[in-house]
Amino acid sequence: MPEKIEKSLTEVIYYKIKKMMLDYEIIPGQRLIFSDLAKRLGVSRTPVNNALSILANEGFLDFVPNQGYTVHQITKEEAESLYEMREIMELGAIEKVIKNLSPQKIEKLERQKILFENAVEDNLTRERFILDQEFHVSILDISENKYLPDYFREIYQRIFLRHRVESLRTGRAKNVISEHRQLLEAVKNRDIEEAKKMVSFHISAGREYVFTSIFNNMKDAV
């Protein structure tokens, strides 16, 4: 019984630490101190240690013996692979998405699109990235493949949780709004080829934005 309780507590702490990453309370490159996290979360060091170990195994943290854990900063090679996986998933789902469309599902997509557009008024924040993520999840949901949304969130978060928001250049958000609208229009028109074209263009533009902002800056800093 105690083992089951400890496992549940580890899971709770895992999600709390991940939420701290989502909220940008913990940033890429930051070293994590067990005692500080345990005090902040109001638990002993054991569930914190267990949760950090899981996050390290998932690639969100780096562990160095005798030094502890640091929030992982994404590499160019990792980003290349993740964007490739994202494109494969989204392109592969388009036909089923269009096949399963209904007025109610279109209305949900419209609502998700508007949520992102409203957030663009703000500066670069994690919330904006989460809303972008959920717009794409709403599209994948329509495919009725129960695994796709969670796998997509995992890939998306492996990209944006592991780079610093302040590294990104401003100005991309308005383009994202336009691309979302064009993608949604193609889906609503049940135009498979146009929808696939917009998915590829949108992902390629986002990749270029991240690569130019982050990896060029890292190169300049060396």
Image (spheres, rainbow, N blue to C red):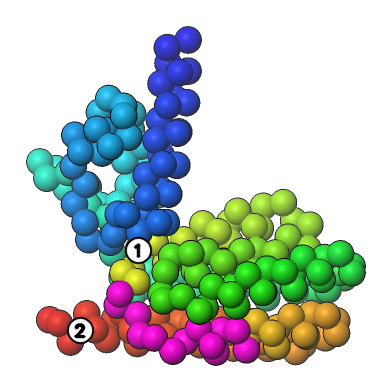
Above or below, 66 against 143 in this view is above
Q: Where is residue 80 in the image (x, y as percent from the top left)?
A: 42, 75
Above or below, 80 against 142 in this view is below
Instruction: State whether residue 53 appears in this view.
Output: no
Left or right: 72, with 58 as reference point: left
Circle 1 SS class:
loop
Residue 74 or residue 11, whichever sits in front: 11
The span shown in magenta is 166-178
Q: Distance between the residues labelled 1 and 2?
A: 17 Å
- The residue positioned 29% from the left and 77% from the top of the image is 167
**Residue 177 among those drawn in magenta:** yes
Q: Where is residue 96 in the image (x, y as percent from the top left)?
A: 81, 68
Q: Which amino acid does label 1 sit on?
A: Arg
Q: Which amino acid does label 2 sit on?
A: Lys
Q: Position of residue 199 (x, y in %)?
A: 64, 82
Question: For the image shown, how many numbered marks are present on the structure?
Answer: 2
Residue 121 or residue 73, whichever sits in front: 121
Above or below, 56 against 136 in this view is above
Quadrant of the rendered image containing residue 117: bottom right
Above or below, 135 against 40 in this view is below
Q: Residue extending furthest top?
A: 1
Q: Mark 2 points at which residue?
A: 219
Left or right: 56, with 68 as reference point: right
- The residue positioned 46% from the left and 82% from the top of the image is 207
Q: Where is residue 106 in the image (x, y as percent from the top left)?
A: 82, 71
